[in-house]
């Protein structure tokens, strides 16, 4: 075998795979409504692009410090103060090549073989495989739509063993949009404190909460909680900068310097040009973020109502992110053209082929019987997509 066992044990990101299939059909001239993508459909704001162009012109195009420039770290420190009431020093911050890279480096830095890392299902698709890549063990705690896909504290308690190293909390959540309030986070943090485990807080959707919901970073619960929490955030989602690849981590010095070591032997610094752009994103006007949030809120309301109007689909209205995660259990076991639809993946395939609508089956996120739709697409597209779904499901017997 040429390929390592480690790599044979993981799978490519299923959300990127669906996106690839939809894009392929599109390139063949098929008019696809794509609810697949996990990225804002907005363009990166101009003042951020200008900062990058200036960086290139100024020759800011060489190696910079492994963990990012001091200028960006200071902008991040300021952001944590302003948005989260959290105080960090520069040696408690590291910038990586996207929040995905941040989480990868965190897990590489804290997990030994056999260590267990807990997270909730439905989950972001990269958690299990990143944990497996560190020879650690993913421990999944299921949530229910009746609880708005939020974990019950007792279910976390039951999952903890002597080997538990960390707990990942992703609020607002990809794929469900589930968003935890301060009180709920405090309860979860208490469990981590009592059991001496670390918290990894994936706050990447911080900027997208709706109906006046107040975002809380779990690290801000108390000094004790901050000391055991590793906060991950980035500019990808909040500033429509997915292609720029800038994510950052704040946490205990010891962990941050371990991450710097991993980074120094793998990627080295995040791209210097993107680093300048990220300074502009975090320190410049936040107006584009508010505009995106407003637009997403309208789309969320529209898509939830539209989905619930289709017989058989049940969709709860989440407080955050830009996804909805409706149940499609009603359609499982039905038939189209003599072919049975057994799983949500079959259903997603049926929608892609029959309705030319791309969605991601819930099984990819550890929850069978559901599908994820991203509403990071125009109201017009959402409207067309919903009409197509409504028409297609009538064909099921
Ligand atoms: C998109 C996403 C990330 C990673 O974002 P980057 O583009 O790597 O900065 C991390 N966590 C969740 C839950 C996400 O949806």
Image (cartoon, rainbow, N blue to C red):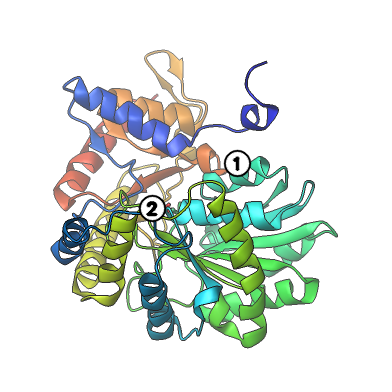
330 or 36: which is nearer to us? 36
Query: Is the residue marked by circle 1 packed among few (<14), some (14-19), or many (20+) residues within 10 Å?
Result: many
Residue annotated with mark 1: 129
Q: What's the residue at 39%, 78% (across, down)? A: 74
Q: What's the residue at 32%, 48% (across, down)? A: 307
Query: Is the residue marked by circle 2 packed among few (<14), some (14-19), or many (20+) residues within 10 Å?
Result: many
Residue annotated with mark 2: 324
Q: What's the residue at 34%, 67% (across, down)? A: 208
Q: Is residue 84 left or right of residue 281?
A: right
Q: Is residue 394 visible?
A: no
Q: Earlier in the sequence, mark 2 or mark 1?
A: 1
Disc 2 secondary structure class: strand
Give the quadrant of the N terminus.
top right
Q: Number of numbered discs present?
A: 2
24 or 378: which is nearer to us? 24
Q: Dots 2 and 1: beta carbons under 8 Å?
A: no
Give the quadrant of the C terminus.
top left
Q: Is residue 18 left or right of residue 122?
A: left
In three-dimensional space, the C-alpha distance between marks 2 and 1, rounded to whole angstroms, equals 23 Å
Disc 1 secondary structure class: helix
**Residue 61's spot in the image, x, y percent?**
28, 54
196 or 107: which is nearer to us? 107
Q: What's the residue at 44%, 55% (across, down)? A: 269
Residue 238 appears in which quarter of the rendering? Answer: bottom left
Q: Nearer the viewer's eye, disc 2 or disc 1? A: 1
Q: Is residue 53 left or right of residue 339?
A: left
**Residue 392's spot in the image, x, y percent?**
28, 30
């Amino acid at each position: 075998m040429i390929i390592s066992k480690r790599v044979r044990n993981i799978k490519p990101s299923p959300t990127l795979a669906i996106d690839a299939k939809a894009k392929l059909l599109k390139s063949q001239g098929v008019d696809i409504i794509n609810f697949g993508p996990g990225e804002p459909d907005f363009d990166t704001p101009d003042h951020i692009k200008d900062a990058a162009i200036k960086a290139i012109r100024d020759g800011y195009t060489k190696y910079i410090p492994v963990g990012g420039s001091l200028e960006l770290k200071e902008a991040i420190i300021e952001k944590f103060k302003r948005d989260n009431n959290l105080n960090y020093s520069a040696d408690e911050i590291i910038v990586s090549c996207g929040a995905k890279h941040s989480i990868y480096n965190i897990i590489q830095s804290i997990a030994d073989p056999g260590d267990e890392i807990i997270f909730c299902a439905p989950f972001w698709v990269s958690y299990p495989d990143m944990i497996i890549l560190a020879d650690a063990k993913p421990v999944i705690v299921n949530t229910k739509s009746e609880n708005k896909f939020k974990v019950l504290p007792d279910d976390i308690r039951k999952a903890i063993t002597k080997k538990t190293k960390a707990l990942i909390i992703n609020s607002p959540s990809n794929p469900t949009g589930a968003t935890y309030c301060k009180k709920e986070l405090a309860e979860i943090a208490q469990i981590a404190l009592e059991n001496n485990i670390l918290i990894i807080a994936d706050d990447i959707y911080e900027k997208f909460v709706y109906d006046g919901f107040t975002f809380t970073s779990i690290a801000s619960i108390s000094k004790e909680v901050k000391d055991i929490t590793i906060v991950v955030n980035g500019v990808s989602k909040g500033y429509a900068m997915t292609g720029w690849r800038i994510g950052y981590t704040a946490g205990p010095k010891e962990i941050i310097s371990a991450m710097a070591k991993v980074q120094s032997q793998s990627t080295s610094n995040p791209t210097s040009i993107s680093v300048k752009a990220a300074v502009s994103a975090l320190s410049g006007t936040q107006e584009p973020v508010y505009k995106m949030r407003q637009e997403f809120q309208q789309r969320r309301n529209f898509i939830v109502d539209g989905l619930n109007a289709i017989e058989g689909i049940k969709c709860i209205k989440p407080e955050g992110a830009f996804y909805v995660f409706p149940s499609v259990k009603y359609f499982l076991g039905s038939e189209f053209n003599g072919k049975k639809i057994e799983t949500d993946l079959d259903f997603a395939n049926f929608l892609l082929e029959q309705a030319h609508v791309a969605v991601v089956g819930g099984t990819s996120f550890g929850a069978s019987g559901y599908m994820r739709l991203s509403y990071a697409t125009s109201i017009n597209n959402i409207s067309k997509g919903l009409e197509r779904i409504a028409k297609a499901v009538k064909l099921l017997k």
